[in-house]
Amino acid sequence: MIIGGGPLFTFGESNLYLACGGIRIHDGLVVEVAPFGDLKEKYPEEGIYDTKGKTILPGMTCAHHHLYSTFARGISLPGDPPATFGKILEQLWWRLDKVLTLDDVYLSALIALIECIRSGTTAILDHHASPFAVRGSLQAIARAVERAGIRACLCYEVSDRDGPEIAEEGISENADFIGYTQWQCSDFLKGTFGLHASLTLSDETMRAALAFARPLKVGFHIHAAEGPEDVADSLRRSGRRVIERLDDLEILGEKTLIAHAIHVDDHEIELLARSGTMVAHNASSNMNNAVGFAPIPRLLEAKIPVGIGTDGMTGDLFSELRTAFLLEKHALADPRRGWADVSKMFANNSTIFSSYFDHAVGTLVPGGYADLIVLDYHPPTPFNSDTFLGHLFFALSSRMVDSTIVGGRFLMKERQLLFLDEASLAVAARELSVKLWQRF
Ligand SMILES: [Zn+2]
């Protein structure tokens, strides 16, 4: 199949722009990127989808998501409004995850995945918690991911906060799911080892997780140094700061992704850089929890692959990129900031995803996954490689996403979801969420 007919941006190393570009797709992968007219002439037998002037971009990617957060939308919290990050965890997230059933896990994932498809997000790294429905939870999310048709790498957040038995279940859930995905060899579904955060994990539990992760040759996906609570807890437990503690316990490494890295000092940045650890920056969540601004310029100067996630706030990476852009300027009180760093982090998502998936993600190159989106955008000023970031930060939006294609397959075509009935799924979700709120 050939998809083309509008401005095409490939991103990635080639960072190619074609005024009227096309992509030839075979077996879910990009085979060729060239002017649309040339492809049509060269391959007259191929099926063609003409975007008729609409823009073609690689699909968006999210390096840290929580699909289970769907049912938090509109929920009321008991007691006074939480005044600290620790209180937000106690009053919202650690109450919500305790009452999730496997049915809730499946449907909240599916609803969040619809938002991804509508927003043009074609690949995510999810971090899941449901401590009283641990076993089978990753398979429940996997069913939702397969039904939705996007790419996802899943893990379960192991934690000691609900006792040793539930921590053990979390370890088994990760190990079983990783084994399953490695046996399955799917291009759409991957597994990595999830850990909640230093502040809810003992040394023993992290060592037990490492003993399972090592033979499976996977790293970890863990929250680290998100709030000051994590640092204080780590110093109390070990006399070491969070990243130092994770380094001592051999959790860091080239296959490990940490979310946040806000409260880190120079030595911790050096440890992250030396170990090749990846970082996911979550600007809107950090603002929402008022936990501070990650030292993005210093992390990037240290050549740490920092990418962009949403922390369950949204599946919309257009809005997240703009938030990250504005937050950096605001936090550093410097209007020059944001441009280079957010652009670099956006590109780093491809690097991060390449450590989980077998072909290139987030870029349209021959041999990479044919994950692309079509945007209905009428640029009022010149629109090309030189001006792209200005359009991205000040104009492009998920409401312009017209079609979403993953592995060469349309999941949404001209704003119509092809395989999911959004309205009836929302009805079912409202019924389940009312029951969940009663248990909350
Ligand atoms: Zn998170």
Image (cartoon, rainbow, N blue to C red):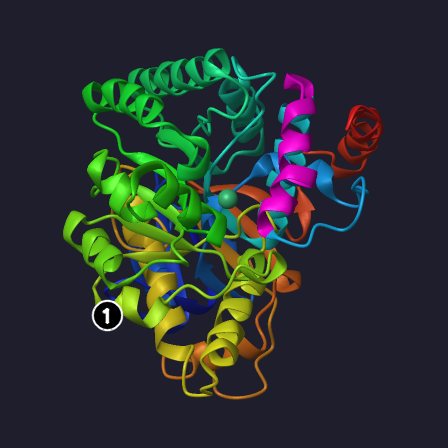
The image shows residue 211, relative to residue 278, as above or below, that is above
Magenta region? 85-103
> Measuring 50% from the left and 64% from the top, which residue is drawn there?
292
Q: Is residue 185 left or right of residue 253?
A: right
Residue 21 visible within the image? yes
Residue 92 inside the magenta-drawn segment: yes
Q: In which quarter of the image is the N terminus?
A: top left
Q: Which of 247 and 14 is in front in this view?
A: 247
Which image quarter: residue 419?
top right
The image shows residue 428, relative to residue 23, as above or below, that is above
Query: Percent x, y for residue 227?
Result: 49, 52
Query: Percent x, y for residue 218?
Result: 25, 29
Residue 298 inside the magenta-drawn segment: no
> Measuring 54% from the left and 29% from the top, which residue is drawn there?
129
Which image quarter: residue 186?
top left
Q: Is residue 147 left or right of residue 23?
A: right
Query: Percent x, y for residue 431?
Result: 84, 27
Q: Which residue lies furthest to the left in this view?
A: 274
Q: Residues within 10 Å of mark 1 (few under 14, many from 20)?
A: few
Say what secondary structure mark 1 lies in.
helix
Look at label 1 and name its amino acid.
Glu
The image shows residue 351, relative to residue 397, as above or below, that is above
Residue 227 visible within the image? no
> Measuring 42% from the left and 67% from the top, which residue is drawn there?
8
Q: In this view, does 272 lie to the left or right of 429?
A: left
Which image quarter: residue 213?
top left
Q: Nearer the viewer, residue 280 or 181?
A: 280
> Measuring 47% from the left and 88% from the top, which residue is drawn there?
335
Residue carrying label 1: 301
Query: Percent x, y for residue 337?
Result: 41, 81
